[in-house]
Amino acid sequence: MVQGFGQIIVQALSLGSLYAILAIGFSLIFGSTRVLNLAHGSFVILAAYIAYFIERYYSVGFIASSIVSSILSLIFLPVLEFIGSRTSTHKESFSLILTFGVALVLQSFYSAMFSSDYRILYSNSTIYNLTKLGLSISSIQLTIILSSLFTIIFLFVMFRKTMTGKALRATIHNDEAALLSGIPVKQMRLLAIGLGCFATGLAGSLYVRVSYVHPAGDIEITLIALLITLFAGRGKIRRVLINAWLFALIETIVSYWCGAKWRELLSSLFIIIVLMGRGEEILNNSSGK
Amino acid sequence: MNKSRLFKLLPPLVWLIILSLGWIHKIPESFLSVLTTAFLYGAMATAWNIHALSGVTSLGHAAFFGLGAYGFALAISKHGFPFWTGLLAGACCAVIYALLWILSIDKLRHGSFVLATFVSVEIPRVIIENVETITNGSAGIMNIRVPNLPIPIPTGLQGWYVITVALTGILLWLHHKALFSRWGWGLKAIRDNERAALAVGVPVDFLRRLTLLLSSFFMGVCGGIYASIIGFVEPSVVFGLHFSAIPLVFSLFGGKENAWGPLLGAIILCSLDQLIMVPLFPEAHRAIYGISLFLTLWFLPKGILAWKKTG
């Protein structure tokens, strides 16, 4: 029983770490531009396809493919910057409709480019047995946990200890006040979007190792990123990781008891509950009102 | 007969002429197929817009469409219902889900409402995929055999054309009322300023809920008709992003505040899609809807009929 629960924790840690890395890009972009990016899942899917094809056809490892997909994910920077700059003068629904349109275009584009086949990167995963605890963890799970922790710690330290990070935090918290105190808000916004895109690229290269990637698989990713960001609030790096772990734990327990098929229902229900509870508060703050 | 009365009679007359095309046997099937799809999508866009006229934007009408399609498919295939009762059963499923919206997300506004509707499509999809004993899960329901209709209309594609045109006619009349009747003015007041509307005695909640129920009912009917034309339903298709997107795209493109706007948007974009995009880019033809959305929001925020005053 104890061992079974321990294994659930390991599974939840790995799943939660993946969710955190999926959500961190969304959270950074939402924080800096106020854009709730409904095309976030599509961005992750593109990064996943890039990682998939690079690893399959050039026989490179995880680090090389994740660097390439992260760099190539920066192509979304101008799109998001453009939408973000328009959002400041329009209602919040505008960015939702616009990014919804981006998701539609990208879904069609992926169908044409990559076909509707389901793709996943299988690799020989080593299983590490922690005999004293009676637990086991695969090398893929370990890679996901370490990558996620590294990204979150890097961002956390950057936000807390560097001048650029502090300026970035100020911009996320209140861009008008930041501008008045001499912070180059536009550059900070670009930096946040760039970091968000980079994290999205990394998320894609991890996602394709544990989950099937196909053109219409973006909604699930968007919903998870949305849920974790709504729970965490704007610019809260640590909370993204903690909420992702918590949500993954709940999801793993539900999968264990009710079957994995009902897992997808959770994120939708949670988002609606959050929106009913404090949706106006979160989104009104995000509009800078 | 004076001029204004003649002008009022013109739309129904045009409508009757369009409807009568369904009885002409010489019309090429490919042309009729495009028209049938355009009118079905036009009906969906008009139904969506009736709700949007109350000042909210929904990205979740695929839920009503999908429930309508599944309700119809189950009623016909598993319980042997007649066609019209099957359509009604599907529409009732959609209305029940709309009632759940009213009970849960009714108080949300702006971005929160848009997000909640976007997310709410996943709930019926996941449930339908998982209740395999009733719905066949993600495999969907195949071979939906529609019984003969007890009305004197042509069979096959011509019959579907007549049904979709007739449905669009009903929806256009309702849409016209939602723009120009007494309750239509109430909706306009809500769109312009909800608090002010409430202050002058407009029943804001009642009107918003009424439009949602009407909209969901007709979306459900459209889902049922779609299922009967295509002959199968699959959760990933009928609850897909596509069916949430097209009513929004067509309405914005045609003009939300014009009685004919959503239908015109559907006819133009659907024809472009079927006649140009599908032959040129068979896999990516749906990109036209996303691209039209950008172009409309950027260059024609009030739609292509914006030049025509709505009164």
Image (spheres, rainbow, N blue to C red):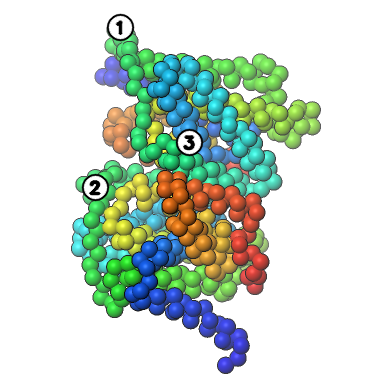
Residue A132, numbered label = 1
The residue carrying mark 3 is A41
Q: Locate the N terminus of chain A by quadrant.
A: top left
Query: Circle 1 marks a residue in which chain?
Result: A
Query: What amino acid does circle 1 point to?
Result: Lys
Is residue B49 visible in the rendered image? The answer is: no
**How far from the left and from the top, in percent, is residue A97?**
56, 48
Q: Are marks 2 and 1 in contact (CB under 8 Å)?
A: no
Secondary structure beneath disc 2?
loop
Query: What amino acid does circle 3 point to?
Result: Gly
Q: What residue appears at the point 23 percent right and 56 percent down from the top-left corner?
A: B143
Residue B136, numbered label = 2
Q: What residue appears at the point 49 percent right and 78 percent down from the top-left corner?
A: B14
Is residue B282 visible in the rendered image? The answer is: yes
Q: Residues within 10 Å of mark 1 (few under 14, many from 20)?
A: few
Residue at the bottom extreme of this rendering: B1
Image side of residue A5 versus residue B268, left or right: left
Query: What amino acid does circle 2 point to?
Result: Asn
Q: Determine if marks 3 and 2 fall on one subunit.
A: no
Query: Circle 3 marks a residue in which chain?
Result: A
Sequence-wise, which precedes: disc 3 or disc 1? Answer: 3
Q: CA distance from mark 2 to mark 1?
A: 45 Å
Secondary structure beneath disc 3?
helix
Q: Please tell me how many numbered marks the rendered image carries.
A: 3
Query: Circle 2 marks a residue in which chain?
Result: B
Secondary structure beneath disc 1?
loop
Marks 3, 1: nearer the viewer: 3
Q: Residues within 10 Å of mark 3 (few under 14, many from 20)?
A: many
